[in-house]
Amino acid sequence: LSKNGITPVIPPPSHATVLNKENSTWHDKIVSYIKEKGTVYAFHKKYDYGIRSKVEAQFSRIKRCIGPSLMTQKIESQKVEMVIIANIINLWNSFGMANSVKNV
């Protein structure tokens, strides 16, 4: 991947070690960075790892509040409904990012 200009951002397992092989330079850099910082969360922060799950959680909240489908059947009514939904989502987003809380 690295030779093609693609940056893989998959965290290695917690027991990973530096391999010092020709084709493991990216792996070695990641493992060294995590060991240097002392936590895998430094890797998550540096490469924005986990953004997709935040986006999926936001869509899940929208679907639970608004519903998974449009209510109207006519195309013109659906266009109006989508504008209303977009305005509601923009209003929610203006409040800031949602805080997720685990139920124990």
Image (cartoon, grey):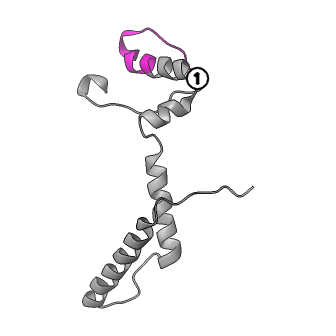
Q: Quadrant of residue 100?
A: bottom right
Left or right: 71 as drawn, with respect to 39: left
In the rendered structure, which segment of residues is drawn in magenta?
15-29
Q: Residue at x 24, y 27 (%)?
A: 4
Q: Residues within 10 Å of mark 1 (few under 14, many from 20)?
A: few
Quadrant in which the N terminus is drawn: top left
Q: Position of residue 101 (x, y in %)?
A: 64, 57
Whether residue 28 appears in magenta in the rendering, the answer is yes
71 is higher (above) or lower (below) than 97: below
- Residue 23 horizontal/vertical position (percent): 36, 15
Q: Which residue appears at 48% of the width and 31% of the height?
A: 43
Q: Quadrant of the C terminus?
A: bottom right
Q: Does 27 appear above or below 66?
A: above
Q: Residue furthest front?
A: 95
Name, please, the residue furthest toward the right.
Answer: 104
Amino acid type, callout 1: Gly
- Check the image and report above or below for 13 versus 22: below
Residue name at image x 52 percent, y 18 percent: 36
Which residue lies under the disc numbered 1? 38
Residue at the image position 71 percent from the left and 58 percent from the top: 103
Numbered disc 1: secondary structure: loop
- Residue 95: % across, % down: 46, 66
70 vs 97, left or right, is: left
